[in-house]
Amino acid sequence: MKSPELLRETAKVLEETEEKIKSLTVLSPRRKQSALNKIREAKENFRKLADDVVIDNEELANFFLKRAVRLKNATNDKTIEKLGEKEYMKDVEAMLKYSKAAPYDFAGYMKYVNRAYKAYVWGMVSFFVTTTFLPVEFKITSLILLIPILLSLLSLRKRGYTGLMLAFAAVPIPLITGALAVRAYSEVFITPNALQEAAQGLGVSATTAQIIAGVMVLFGIAELLLLSYAIYMFYKHRHAFL
């Protein structure tokens, strides 16, 4: 595999970049220290990753090396004056982001993100199912959330940071709905009046109403568990998203 060698070379170039940053005079002291910290972290990330590679991705490793070389070449007072401090710092930040995302491409960490994605999908499916027999307000809410949820799914599939933010924003309401749904459907088994109202409202027998309520309780529990797991894993592996 060529990837480990290329990643080590990337770390070496970043180490050279670090030395060049120390001699810069155009950056403010705060930004200079910030750049040093980020480049050091990126360097260590790539160096560590080189020993953990299980997936050979020579093209991506070459991309990282080229970006590191470009950053190194830009690390001088004259170039930074042309680019501007903000643009230079954006390139530094990008290098750090790449170093944090790289394990998902080389070390096999994508399996954790894929598990979270599947949990998110099925959790949202459960959310829409649980609103089927709830009051109309819940149905309207689910329709309002439909577009953001679909957009988050599309973006998450491509490891887009926007999708991650949409997922974080979309999950709270389904979680609350899931908890309320479990409570509401459980009432059918606890309160005779609730059972009677459910049977009359659905136009079915009491036994059928209990079966439906039982299924909805299971969907509600699944919704809570799956979405809680998904959002935890998405946060834990947030660096996979760019």
Image (cartoon, helix red, strand yellow):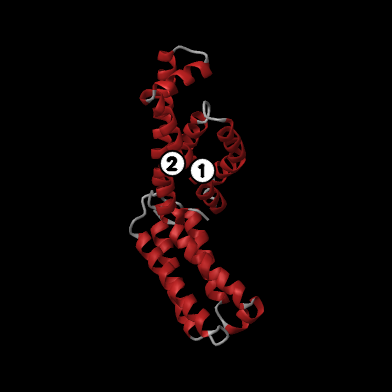
Q: Residue at x 43, y 28 (%)?
A: 185
Q: Residue at x 52, y 43 (%)?
A: 157
Label 1 residue SS? helix
Q: How far from the left and from the top, in percent, is residue 203? A: 52, 14
Question: Can I make out residue 63 in this image?
Answer: yes
Query: Callout 1, which amino acid?
Result: Ile
Q: In the image, is residue 85 above or below residue 143?
A: below
Q: CA distance from mark 1 to mark 2?
A: 11 Å
The residue to which callout 2 is attached is: 227
Q: Residue at x 39, y 46 (%)?
A: 112
Question: Can I make out residue 70 in this image?
Answer: no
Label 2 residue SS? helix
Q: What numbered label is drawn on residue 71?
A: none
1 and 2 marks in contact (CB < 8 Å): no
Q: Residues within 10 Å of mark 2 (few under 14, many from 20)?
A: many
Quick one: 185 or 109, which is closer to the camera? 185
Query: Callout 2, which amino acid?
Result: Leu
Quick one: 141 or 73, which is closer to the camera? 141
Q: Is residue 197 left or right of residue 82?
A: left
In the current view of this chain or complex, which residue is farthest to the right?
A: 82
Q: Residue at x 53, y 19 (%)?
A: 201
Q: How far from the left and from the top, in percent, is residue 27? A: 56, 83
Q: What numbered label is drawn on residue 173?
A: 1
Q: How far from the left and from the top, in percent, is residue 172? A: 49, 46
Q: Tag 2 or tag 1, which sits nearer the N-term?
A: 1
In the current view of this chain or complex, which residue is farthest to the top?
A: 205
Quick one: 152 or 7, which is closer to the camera? 152
Quick one: 87 or 13, which is closer to the camera? 87
